[in-house]
């Protein structure tokens, strides 16, 4: 169970909040800096999902349940859950930072680029599993936070 993972429990005092990025049903996402969250860096830029303090027990469980994807999936295009702080409210989930922002904002900002790829049939070739598709742009990773 998620709550039994004490090795990932991260001290709130090691987080410096910097910038509110968004709001959702659960609360908010804040860009922050975490100290000593990974062994290879003293300080690391992270995203912190903060659950509303007035969340019901059901909402608390849903918040923790939704974090399983980030905890369990090991894929380069899925944010990693680096830690949590769930000993008191509000619950915090500390996640890998995505420098290009959220998927929705990226897609809106790059709609013209997407239309060009669509006209070239890139989306169809990708859907059919054609790995020989050539892109004129550099590889970028966009992450989804919901």
Image (tube, rainbow, N blue to C red):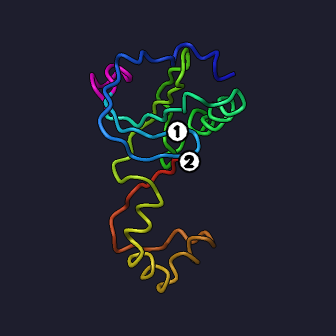
Question: What residue would you read off at disc 2?
Answer: 146
For image coordinates 52% across by 38% down, the residue present is 27
x and y percentages locating residue 83 in the rendered image: 48, 25
Question: What residue would you read off at disc 1?
Answer: 27
Dominant SS in magenta = strand
Given the current orientation, which residue lies at the most extreme front position? 54
Q: Give the total number of marks visible in the rendering.
A: 2
The answer to which quarter of the image holds residue 20 is: top left
Given the current orientation, which residue lies at the most extreme bottom position? 119
Q: Which residues are magenta?
A: 34-44
The answer to which quarter of the image holds residue 106 is: bottom left
For image coordinates 41% across by 55% down, the residue present is 141
From the viewer's perspective, is residue 41 above or below residue 27? above
x and y percentages locating residue 79 in the rendered image: 49, 42
Q: Is residue 23 left or right of residue 17?
A: right
Q: Is residue 123 left or right of residue 63?
A: left
Q: Is residue 96 left or right of residue 8?
A: left
From the viewer's perspective, is residue 104 above or below residue 130? above
- Mark 2 surroundings within 10 Å by alpha-carbon count, few (fewer than 14), some (14 through 19), many (20 or more): few
Residue 41 among magenta residues: yes
In which quadrant will I find the N terminus?
Answer: top right
Cα gap from disc 1 to disc 2, whole angstroms:
11 Å
- Mark 1 surroundings within 10 Å by alpha-carbon count, few (fewer than 14), some (14 through 19), many (20 or more): some
Residue 61 among magenta residues: no
Q: Nearer the viewer, mark 1 or mark 2?
A: 1
Of the image marks 1 and 2, the number of the one nearer the N terminus: 1
């Amino acid at each position: 169970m998620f709550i039994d993972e004490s090795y990932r429990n991260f001290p709130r005092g090691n987080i410096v909040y910097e910038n509110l990025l968004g709001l959702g049903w659960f609360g908010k996402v804040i860009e922050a800096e975490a100290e000593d969250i990974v062994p290879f860096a003293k300080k690391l830029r992270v995203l912190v999902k903060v659950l509303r303090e007035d969340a019901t027990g059901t909402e608390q469980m849903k918040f923790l349940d939704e974090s399983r994807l980030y905890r369990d999936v090991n894929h380069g295009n899925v944010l990693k859950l680096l830690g949590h702080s769930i000993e008191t409210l509000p619950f915090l989930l500390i996640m890998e930072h995505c420098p290009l922002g959220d998927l929705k904002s990226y897609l809106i900002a790059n709609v013209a680029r997407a239309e060009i790829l669509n006209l070239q049939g890139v989306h169809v070739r990708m859907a059919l599993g054609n790995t020989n598709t050539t892109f004129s742009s550099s590889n970028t990773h966009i992450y989804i936070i919901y």
